[in-house]
Image (spheres, grey):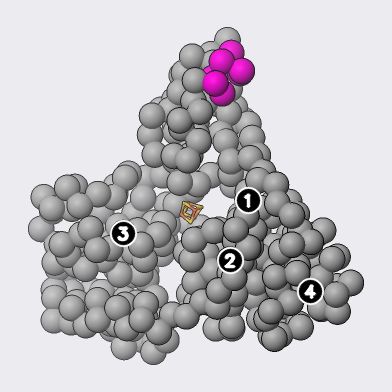
Amino acid sequence: MRIGVQLPDGLKRRAIEICEKLGSFMLSGETCFGACDIDLALLEDVDVLYHYAHTKLLDFEKVVYVPFYVDYEVEKVAEKLEEIKERNIALISTAQYCHKLPELKEVLEKRGFSVELKKGSSRVEMPGQVLGCNYSSLRDARADAIVFVGDGIFHARGALLYTGKKVYSINPLSFELQEIHVKDFLRERYFLISKCVGLKNLGILVSTKKGQKRLKLAEKIREKAIEHGLKAIIVYIGEITPEKLENLPFEFYVNTACPRISYDDYKRFRMPIITPQEFDVLIGERKDLLVDEIVDS
Ligand code: SF4
């Protein structure tokens, strides 16, 4: 029996140990940023593929999703959250930390907080879970503030852009607490949009990764681009790298794949890469840069 293993970058250094434990000798060497990113080539050649650290997003018969939970002290997180002034909050987190949100909610409620903890669309599995491309667990949130439990600011900033509400981020291991601000970020995004004004040749990036592929959205963007006098071609692409785009003749891009490419990686690219919402701002169809819910095509 051939057993395949796919690990996110953070776990790759433990590949030998994990493969040995599973009796596997077939490891994916591709990048793996989310459950959207199943290694289809490896999947074809194995009987079962163990995909680590992400919850199920795509339905493949041969894929087993293996959770990777990080333990943390809920009482200490709750104690630190006493520093925020809002008492009506919503909790969110990522797959590694989400398992303890129900316990955190209970502890916070004993301390006098009112806590929303909701499960979102089928793209996420646990209450409060968010992805960088999916904040549906915050849909219709009534809380005065959102608390993101996790590391980095990518998801916390996304929650702010999705809800327009005040967002705090707390690292459950270091207990560092910060309020998220997006003023500088938005200034940079408007600057990037302004660089696209007057450009005529648009490439619309569609990922070949199954869980990131949004062809219908790309086709809609193309229609709008044509209406506004642009030349627009849909570009199918796997891993989006500066080298690949360098050989293409486009002056700017709209990215329909993972939002991290537009928001975190855009400085690596010579040409502007904007989001679908930002494209609507460019053509005058909307004013704000709040993030819409992503619907798969
Ligand atoms: S598209 Fe990006 S944000 Fe969404 S699940 Fe994949 S890696 Fe995560």
Nearest to N terminus: mark 2 or mark 4:
4
Specify the quadrant of the image occupied by residue 189.
bottom left
Overall secondary structure of the magenta stretch? helix
Q: Secondary structure at mark 3?
A: loop
- Residue drawn at the location 42% of the way across and 52% of the way down: 213
The type of residue carrying mark 1 is Ala
- Residue drawn at the location 65% of the way across and 45% of the way down: 70
> Marks 4/3: CA distance?
34 Å
Q: Where residue 74 sits in the image (x, y, percent)?
A: 76, 58
Q: Nearer the viewer, residue 185 or 272?
A: 185
- Residue drawn at the location 70% of the way across and 47% of the way down: 71
Q: Where residue 119 sits in the image (x, y, percent)?
A: 72, 62
> Marks 2/3: CA distance?
25 Å
Residue extending farthest to the top is: 1
Nearest to N terminus: mark 1 or mark 2:
1
Does residue 256 appear in the picture of this structure? no
The type of residue carrying mark 2 is Glu
- Residue 186 on the magenta segment: no
Q: Which residue is mark 3?
A: 265
Q: Is mark 3 within 8 Å of ligand 1?
A: no
Q: Is the N terminus in the top left, top right, bottom left or bottom right quadrant?
A: top right
Q: Nearer the viewer, residue 57 or 267?
A: 267
Image disc number at residue 115? 4
Residue extending farthest to the right is: 110
The type of residue carrying mark 4 is Val
Q: Which residues are magenta?
A: 17-23
> Marks 2/4: CA distance?
20 Å
Q: Which residue is mark 1?
A: 95
- Residue 18 on the magenta segment: yes
Q: Which residue is mark 2?
A: 176
